[in-house]
Each structure stands twice: as structure tokens, then as C-alpha cells.
Amino acid sequence: MGSLSTNTFSFLDSDGFTNDSKMVIDFIADYYKNIENYPVQSQVKPGYLLTKLPDTAPYCPESLEDVLKDVTDSIIPGLTHWQSPNFFAYFQANASTAGFVGEMLCTGLNVVGFNWISSPAATELESIVMDWIGKMLKLPSTFLFSGNGGGVLHGSTCEAIVCTLAAARDRTLRNIGAENIAKLVVYASDQTHSTLLKGVKLVGIPSSNFRCLSTSFSSEFSLSPQSLEDAIENDIKAGYVPLFICATVGTTACGAVDPVMDLGKIARKYNLWFHIDAAYAGSACICPEFRHYLDGIELADSLSMNPHKWLLTNMECCCLWVKQPRLLIESLSSNPEYLKNNASESNAVVDYKDWQIALSRRFRALKLWACDS
Ligand SMILES: *Cc1c(COP(=O)(O)O)cnc(C)c1O
């Protein structure tokens, strides 16, 4: 055949795969069995690995036994053991057997679901699972596909924030003209995660237009609606255009919760995009006794939450729900000939490539589905 196709065989042959993967699974199971024996924080010095590995890749293949021996001798000492029961930094113990099984299925099937036709199940399962979790969180139906909103899985909150900022930016610039981008202002409390400022810079809004509003001990470090409204009024008087307010449910430094309902009312009054970052604490809102932290969510435009923090989902997995997917798509879509669905389907399907930064995407929904099943 004169084609360049390499698809006449696969580099993953079933027999070798069965043996090798069993060995790796046993290795991982042993690791978990012994995890408490390791010092939680790695004790190595910077550059330690260079002294342990050769300068160039080996010319001849090595056996899996040798590779696993290298993992034991060279890699494990350089790990900080996030899954150890003695690990209390950041977010811990997010792995689960269900998450791992889902991750294996994702890696094993290895499809690339950038649009519907490239793997219909990848898209459809993701939409279904996003509606499931939305219902577990008792989100208003306007965030669900069944209510003309919808959700997408990103790798991280950073990506979710960049995409929502881009959607908000373009919605407003369509009204005021792209030349006014330097007038757009973004608001959050001084407890907001650093990802927001990164997002502001990435979407081309001057970082000096990021209003980092003070919080205090006396208000448990939550953002005061009055200080938001004062800042918005000041900015309008000075000729700026208020664009975006990010509230946090569960801040990184101290677990503060911003008053979603009151901030939402101000967002609606001034027509700002209202995003809620509930990266780790959002999962807790599935419990009826914590759901009240999301009261007022109906006033928001978007919500992001990382199941890879508190929902026993292996890395990495961030849920983003939006009320108006159209606005994300208008900012992020690209439609070259080679990425089109069949014409008869194209209006009826979701193309997740238009809901995220990257084109290629993993079948993450399998993992979340396995965790929720
Ligand atoms: C962890 C965290 C983030 C950053 O999440 P990534 O997925 O690593 O980008 C943002 N906001 C809050 C509140 C967080 O806890």
C-alpha cells in the first residue's frame, strides 16, 4: 500500500500487555501497601536524578524488571508521597481504586475525543457525567445540558478560569470594541487563588486591572459585597469596564467562603461575569449539610470544581459548568475541514474542542463515571 498509515498493527500487543501490566499493577499495589514506610517528603537534593541516570537513552531495550528496579532505586526516593496517610499538605489521598480503574480504561482505550465524531462515547459520557455531578451538587438546571447549559472536563482550574475569562472578555468586547481591552477589570478577594491573576494576564487584560480586594480576620477572610460594589463604582467613574468577579468557595490559604448570593446580586446589577471557584471545597457541597455554601449559584455564569482534590478521582480532573456554552464556543472554536462532523450531525452534537484550550483530549469522563458508579 502506498499510504503512510501505520495502523496495520499496534504497538500494544495483547499478550505482552497482559503480563507487563500485571507486573506494574502488583508494583503499584506493593507501593500502596508500604507507603507509610517512606518519609512523606522526599529527602533528595536538587539534580539528584542526573547522577543516577545515564546521559543518553539506552541503545538497547531494557526489561520491565530493570525499569521497575530503576523506579524503586531512583524514582521512589524522589517522590513526595501524596497518597500517604501521613501527607497533610495541599490536597491529599485523592486516589481511589475506582479512579484508577477509570484511568486505566481511559489510557487503555486511548481515544482522542476532540469532536463528537472522533469518539461519540467520549463526548456523550462526558456530558452525561457532568449532568450527574451537577445534579449531585443540586446545581440549577440552567447549568445542565438538560437545561441548555452544560459542563466540560478540563485538566485544571487554571484552564477553566482562562476559558471563562476569554468568554467573558469577548462577550464584552463585542459590545465595546476590541480596542478597549485595557479597560476591562477583574475582581476577587485577596484570598483568591493565584490562578486568577495568571488567567487575567493570559487573556490579555493588563494585570494592573486586577482588583485584589482586601479581606480581614473579622469577616473570616470572605469578600465583602460592599467593598466589591465600591470598587466597581470607582472603576466606572474612572472610565473602566467591570468585567468579571471570581468568588471562592473554600480559599486555599484558610478555607474562607465568599458570600455567593450577595456577590451574585452585584454581578447581576452591573452585568459582570460571575465565576465560582470551588476547586476543592465544591465536592463537599454534595453533602446536604454543606450545600448552603453554594446558595446563590443561580446568579453565577460558571462554576469550577476539581474532583481530583476531594472526590477520590485520580489526577487530573476539573469540572467546569457554564450557563451559556455558546459564549465559550464563540471564544474558543476553530473549525477547519479536518475537524468537522458529518453535516447531518453537526448541529445536534457537542464538540468539546470548542470548550477548552487544547484540541486533543483524553477520555477523562470514564474516570469520573467510574468514581460515581
Ligand atoms: C487548587 C485550587 C486552584 C488551582 O487548581 P488547579 O487545578 O491546580 O489549576 C484554584 N483555586 C482553588 C480555590 C484551589 O483550591
Image (cartoon, rainbow, N blue to C red):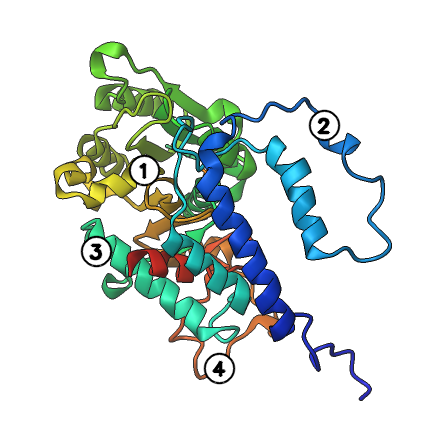
Q: Are marks 2 and 1 in contact (CB under 8 Å)?
A: no
Q: Is mark 3 within 8 Å of ligand 1?
A: no
Q: Amino acid at mark 3?
A: Lys
Q: Amino acid at mark 1?
A: Ala
Residue at left offset 48%, top offset 38%: 34
State the image coordinates of residue 72 (x, y, percent, origin top left). Answer: 63, 40
Question: Looking at the image, is 187 positioned above or below residue 273?
Answer: above
Specify the quadrant that holds the C terminus: bottom left
Q: Amino acid at mark 2?
A: Tyr
Q: Distance between the Cα atoms at labels 2 and 4? A: 55 Å
Q: Secondary structure at mark 1?
A: loop
Residue sitting nearer the eye, 267 or 95: 95
Q: Is mark 1 within 8 Å of ligand 1?
A: yes
Q: Earlier in the sequence, mark 2 or mark 4?
A: 2
Q: Secondary structure at mark 4?
A: loop
Q: Secondary structure at mark 3?
A: helix
* In this rendering, the label closer to the viewer, 3 or 2: 2
Q: Are marks 4 and 3 in contact (CB under 8 Å)?
A: no
Which label was assigned to residue 327? none
| Number of residues whose C-alpha sits closer than 10 Å to that of mark 1, classed few (under 14), some (14–19) or many (20 or more) | many
Which residue has dot 2 on it?
48
Q: Earlier in the sequence, mark 2 or mark 1?
A: 2
Q: Distance between the Cα atoms at labels 4 and 3? A: 32 Å
Residue sitting nearer the eye, 157 or 271: 157
Which residue has dot 4 on it?
343
Q: Distance between the Cα atoms at labels 3 and 2? A: 47 Å
Which residue has dot 1 on it?
278
| Number of residues whose C-alpha sits closer than 10 Å to that of mark 4, classed few (under 14), some (14–19) or many (20 or more) | few
Q: Secondary structure at mark 2?
A: helix
In this picture, residue 76 sits left or right of residue 199: right
Question: Looking at the image, is 36 positioned above or below residue 113?
Answer: above
Q: Is residue 149 visible?
A: no
